[in-house]
Amino acid sequence: MVGVKINGLPFSFDEGTTLLDAAKFLGIPIPTLCSMEGVSPYGACRLCVVEIGEGPKARLVTSCTYPVQEGLKVRTASSRVMRARRMILELYLASCPQSKTVQDLAAAHNIKTQRFRQEHEDCIMCGLCVRICKEQMMSGAIGFRGRGEKRTIGTPFDVKSDVCRTCGACMYVCPACQLRCTFNDPSKAICGGCANLAPPCLAKSSFDDMMCSMDPCVACEIKKD
Amino acid sequence: MERLRTTSDFWGLQRRLLADRDPRKPVLVISAGTCGQASGAGELIRIAKREMLENEMGDRIRLRITGCHGFCEMEPSVLVLPDRVFYPRVKPADLPRILYASVLGEVAEEFLFVDPSTGRRLARQDDIPYFRKQRRTILERNEWVDPIRIVNYLEAGGYGTLCRVLEGGDPVRVIEEMKASGLRGRGGAGFPTGLKWEMLAKAKNGTGKYLVCNGDEGDPGAYMDRAVLEGNPHSILEGMLIGAFATGATDGVMYVRNEYPMAVKHLMIAIRQAREMGLLGEHVLGSMLSFDVRLVKGAGAFVCGEETALMRSVMGFVGEPRQRPPFPVEKGIEGKPTSINNVETWANVPVILEKGGREYARIGTEKSRGTKIFSLVGKIRNTGLVEVPMGITIDEVVNGIGGGALGKSRLKAVQTGGPSGGCIPAHRFDLPIDYDSLAEAGSIMGSGGMIAMDERTCMVDLARYFMSFLKDESCGKCFTCRKGTQRMFEILDDISKGVATLDQLDLLQDLAFVVKDTTMCGLGQTASNPVLSTLRYFRDEYVEHIVHKRCPAGVCKDLIAYSINEKCTGCMLCLKACPSGSITGDKKVRHVIDMATCIKCDACRSVCKLDAVEVR
């Protein structure tokens, strides 16, 4: 067990627990976009920063990757943390204003407007889809390409990957994109994953276990009939 | 090449080599690093070889082709040993004269360096102000060795320190010496090297440990590491071997960027020669030390100079940093403990062990010991590599060694640490150069780039340039670095175009602080430095751009206009130079620039000899 002080109160946790998990266990809210139970921590969205240390050595770290350490002093909502968090949310709002998740987080932090040039991007590059595809679906069909502003997510050479079984997990976990299947009317489905003409789950020939994340799913509706 | 099986084999070979050498025989040293070759050293080498063969001078003079000596402004240069006579900017036609004079032990007076301040001709290299004010412990060695001949390095005493360390047989003592030397990482962060080694030596994580030499030098305007990699690759290998002995490391990786073809070539030769001689591989010189090095070529990403990104790159993945902890020394390449040190750090290791840590620690300041190589570039008279003791003031480097600004203008600021560093204004040139003073002034030591700027440099444009570099080089993994650099560039671009507001200036500052605070790796954490330091020292220039829509330095294209004043004599020079045909006028009639078609390329101003072209 490792003893830490979170917001001034002493707690102890198992070794290897991340600060984010510890805070979650205690019911302390820390917003995050790129962390999810079951996939490895990545530290990409930077929303979950907390302040550790004291005096001139105090610094911000991402709570999703930082493990508890003996005697560590953590502040989850200090003024420095809040200033950073609000600026990060403003940046998100400037790039992905259409994401419900981002809108809700911004509203919760009382951010009503942003001061940058408005963009309309779909992806925040949190990498959840890449990680769930590789780590939970054991597929690894998609990955990152390029760097900096040219960074994108997709299959190699933008050709449909042989290992992709259109399970929909990538869409299911996405906090920003609007591609999640919310319709069981094929004409209204936007993703095309389940509504394609031959859903692989129906054929069941090429994959033993679909591990399907489409919910509700057109294919399942068809199967019922 | 004979294989050395024991340390006594080594000493025997070294004795034989030294006995064969006549120290009074003149040596013609041609510095032919990348910089030398670019300015014509290849031609000099060809002529020197031809003359020596045709006149059978082989037994009276030796030719040595080395890496860069540092005085890039004066390349191609020739140095004649043992009298250390320095000939700057040698023309191929003049070389035979220098060669014959050297054989006779004379000095070719007419080609010597002329001191610009006194007008006197100086023969000895060490009398030249540029060299006299330096303390060249690493760079000096570049003069001694031909990088592709291991024998040369052995003659200069190379690998002797390794041999003594192996004979001493006490790894703990080596680490103690390193700690006593106070050497801090030369890559920029300044972590104490001895401490890092101690952590690696104590790390117990399965079998095998890695040592990495970080030669991914990507800063614009910095090339210290290139000079060492090209000019003295064996010193780095020796440093790594000593490091391996001290820490128990088994594998070494040389990570060198592929944009340095000569460094890659010289390292490949050096590694092969060291392996053939038994200095790399199983049981080095018959000791218990088994260590081998492989060369990994970088694929051109600036971020791969960051240690966690470098490790991923070595393992064959995309070069992206990961969040620390765990630190490389706990979990590095292939999950094994890894210590990553800069090229210059490794080159310092044999020097420290040769002289002793305490002796080394006498150079420099209390918290920053030893010497540091800087690449002095920009609007400065003497560009090149300078090696100075820590604690020397910026003024001594840029005005003393560097010779001050080019032409009639005055220096305005110095950017240290490349795009990750910040600028230091002229009124703070009395600042001593060490890790902590530079950090306090809002900059960083960085790997050692030093870019001098005069009054014709716009600080907004400078910050904008560095931010455009960083936004392209950010890997894009963490959000605040990717979007933060993009947004900072966007605002800086607006300011340089004169369309920004004062609110945006505040936003820029807030954003810069948050980016510094919240990014994952060193690239992002230092990305704000150019913005924050220029805002700190040159805020008035930003305000001038925003409020008065003027660029005081006359650089930002959207805010300037060219005109020709009454000094114009109608010489037609600018008219001919103008690529867009915007200048009209006749001979001996004052010319006129049509701003409607002018593309603001500055060609007219740079060709005018009378200062008749004005920019506002």
Image: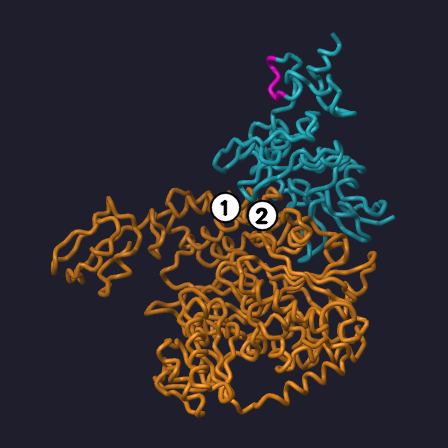
Taking depth in this image into account, of B440 and A181 the one nearest to the observer is A181
Q: Is residue B330 above or below residue A121?
A: below
Using residue B452 as the reference point, say whether residue B299 is left or right of it.
right
The colour with which the image depicts chain B is orange
Are the residues flagged by discs 1 and 2 in contact, CB closer than 8 Å? yes
Residue A191 shown in magenta: yes
Residue B95 shown in magenta: no
Which residue appears at 59% of the width and 40% of the height?
A: A145
Amino acid type, mark 1: Met
Using residue B36 as the reference point, say whether residue B455 is left or right of it.
left
Q: Earlier in the sequence, mark 1 or mark 2?
A: 1
SS at mark 1 in the image: helix
Horizontal and vertical percent for residue B443? 54, 61
Horizontal and vertical percent for residue A224? 75, 10
Which residue appears at 43% of the width and 85% of the height?
A: B55
Using residue B442 as the reference point, say whether residue B76 is left or right of it.
left
SS at mark 2 in the image: helix
The total number of labels drawn is: 2
**Which image quarter is the C terminus of chain A in?**
top right
* Residue B515 numbered mark, or none: 2
Q: Which residues are magenta?
A: A187-192
Instruction: Assign the magenta stretch its main secondary structure.
Output: loop
Q: Is residue B26 above or below residue B258?
A: below
* Colour logic: by chain
Q: Around disc 2, counting alpha carbons within 10 Å, would you say few (fewer than 14), some (14 to 19), or many (20 or more)? A: many
The colour with which the image depicts chain A is cyan
Chain under numbered label 2: B
Which residue appears at 43% of the width and 78% of the height?
A: B50
* Residue B488 numbered mark, or none: 1
**Mark 1 to mark 2 CA distance (whole Å):** 10 Å
Q: Is residue B80 above or below residue B236?
A: below
